[in-house]
Amino acid sequence: MNDRDVRVYEVGPRDGLQNEATPIPTQAKLRFIGLLADAGLREIEATSFVSPRAIPQLADADDLMASLERREGVRHPVLVPNRRGLERAEAAGVDAIAVFTAASEPFTRANINMSIAESIDAFRPVIQHARDHGWWTRGYVSTAFGCPYQGEVDEAAVVGVAGELLELGIDELSVGDTIGVAGPSDVRRVVGALTASGIGVERLAMHFHDTRGTALANVATALELGVRCFDASTGGTGGCPYAPGAAGNLATEDLVYLLDREGLSHGIDLDALLVAAAHVAETLGRPLGTKVGQAGGWRVP
Ligand code: COA
Ligand code: ZN
């Protein structure tokens, strides 16, 4: 990858839809994923193999993955919290998984009913199995910039859990502002601590929520620090049911517009992406609040 290339990792079908009150038919999710691939997205997180009681919105994961059209060059990672999730994912024929923990104990307990240390132990055999099969793997560190239960999170806690996840052999680490509280100086502080600990910036992805309108400022800062992978959700939906107050992910359309203005390449067609965003709005039966979704791209007269 060249320094002007940015990977956009789409989380709309998973992070985006997991918090929606409206039940969404599997067919509508499949169409959404298809439209995202049509728009040029090459990494589309499809769903989670978690407890259907924890996330009822993604209870159709097995059916969804069985019907999903695999396209050449498109990766469809799924979230896996434990061995049971791994078995389901394997039966569904996945070749990319993400495990997820956090930098704060109370959130980790609320979200996956484990301590951070227990989560690392639970992931060890999961990641080992994935690596034995040549799958791509990612680890999430949620609440890296703030926790809904604990408040501020020390960057040392982020560095600690990041190091343990990387030691398991994951390919990529996604550092999450789960409740959307960070500003640019927090990004400098946390990314700086991670890289100072010896983690290469090319291993990092940033996962911003736009709860308080700071997501794009944080992306711009992370770009300056050398980060070249960003998570985003088309339509700006999203949030974790175990993170009270978490609002939407950074919208993919807002991210793509910024990347275009910065002259960075990403392979995504903004107009086609807006078609996928319109499909989300139609499925949810409400207009979406994303900036570029409302204004469109800039058509120079
Ligand atoms: N897929 C399906 N069902 C699962 C499962 C999985 N991966 N893991 C556990 N279960 C089921 C068990 O079979 C059990 O069902 P039963 O009560 O009908 O027997 C039940 O869930 C509880 O299992 P247990 O092992 O005791 O798990 P837990 O209650 O401690 O919950 C998790 C742990 C990780 C399974 C659960 O908290 C979870 O799925 N969290 C995901 C949260 C999430 O996705 N958040 C958003 C992403 S940030
Ligand atoms: Zn998120």
Image (tube, helix red, strand yellow):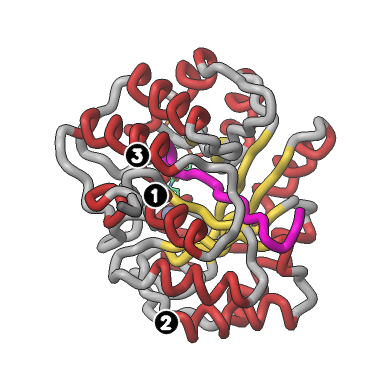
Q: Tell me which residue sits at (36%, 72%) in the image.
A: 214
Q: Are marks 1 and 2 in contact (CB under 8 Å)?
A: no
Q: Which residue lies under the disc numbered 1?
A: 253
Q: Tell me which residue sits at (30%, 21%) in the image.
A: 25
First to last magenta residue range? 1-14
For mark 2, give the secondary structure.
loop
Residue 295 appearing in the image: yes
Q: Which residue lies under the disc numbered 2?
A: 152
Q: Earlier in the sequence, mark 3 or mark 2?
A: 2
Disc 1 marks a residue whose amino acid type is Glu
Q: CA distance from mark 1 to mark 2?
A: 30 Å
Q: Tell me which residue sits at (52%, 78%) in the image.
A: 187
Q: CA distance from mark 3 to mark 2?
A: 35 Å
For mark 3, give the secondary structure.
helix
Residue 233 relative to residue 176: left or right: left
The image quadrant that residue 168 belongs to is: bottom right
